[in-house]
Image (cartoon, rainbow, N blue to C red):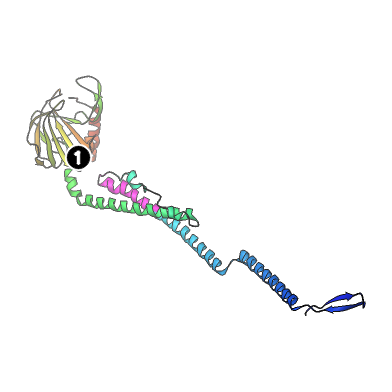
Amino acid sequence: MRKVYYIYNPRTQTYDRIYPTVRQRALSILRQLFIGMGLGAGCFIILLLVFGSPSEKELRIENSRLLAQYNVLSRRLDDAMGVLQDIQQRDDNLYRVILQADPVSPAIRQAGFGGTNRYEELMDLANSKLVVNTTQKLDVLSKQIYIQSKSFDDVIDMCKNHDEMLKCIPAIQPISNKDLRKTASGYGTRIDPIYGTTKFHSGMDFSAHPGTDVYATGDGTVVKVGWETGYGNTIEIDHGFGYLTRYAHLQGYNTKVGKKVVRGEVIGKVGSTGKSTGPHLHYEVHVKGKVVNPVNYYFMDLSAEDYEKMIQLAANHGKVFD
């Protein structure tokens, strides 16, 4: 209903009706129109702020889904890393131990990614911390899987060469000693027979008559035949796979440098040359450049009972010659 306006006329003492001009009517209509548009716009803005636009609502739903998927992916990557760590432990502590190989270095397994920031382009994303963390896990997992794959390639190669390696391991005694009576001084710290001081003995001594045969304890290549200070006449055999054996204080040689020898082949004779107080063979085993106790490598010669007996005899250092 349109409003009607009146004005008091004091002359006639009556109320006269006012008829607005066209301009006034237009201004009134425009004013009402602007007021209505302002109220509508205000309500619309309030609705957008409270409820958001349909597109924003869809984006929020999509972002929530993506965030949930990233969380699920992050947990699955953690599970995969756990499985991979179990595989790595079995590789280092089982497969490589059986094949007598060194474990893969932690520095190689856990090597990071160098260079510039690989994830800089992800830092501007929403939930960037989760995105970057998940991407890092994926990169680390991919690299460690590649390293583990290469490690298994090495293990496969070692398995193929396992029979050859077994032939090369120094697995018998260097002289005939079935009754163990020739076992003399063992590996470890003892009193030096010449200087009378405590000294580390880096091998095992076997007492025997001069001229007793000395055998190669595994297949390999003779790399040294000659005199060495302290050791006298010496033979060294490189067996490959990190194994080297040394035979010292020999009376004579039955081999030469470069000759391929097999386990049980006669390579020399027992003597008393070099720093020695009586005829015997000094025998050493080196594994990957480190001298080790030879008693641990006679598994093709000794029963379990004989092995225990030899350990006791060697530990007592019954006869000391050098």
- At horizontal 17% and vertical 43% (from top left) the residue drawn is 168
- Rendered location of residue 166, percent (x, y): 19, 46
Could you tell me which quadrant the N terminus lies in? bottom right
Asked if residue 157 is positioned above or below residue 196 in the image, the reply reads below
Magenta region: which residues? 81-101
Q: Is residue 61 left or right of residue 276?
A: right
User: Is residue 185 something one can see in this rendering?
Assistant: yes
Which sits in the foreground, 199 or 54? Answer: 54
Which sits in the foreground, 242 or 292? Answer: 242
Main SS, magenta region, reads helix
Within 10 angstroms of label 1, few (less than 14), some, or many (20 or more) residues? many
Give the residue at mark 1: 243
Q: Is residue 70 left or right of residue 191?
A: right
Q: How many marks?
A: 1
- Rendered location of residue 4, percent (x, y): 81, 78
Q: Secondary structure at mark 1?
A: strand
Which sits in the foreground, 103 or 296? Answer: 103
| Amino acid carrying mark 1 in the image | Tyr
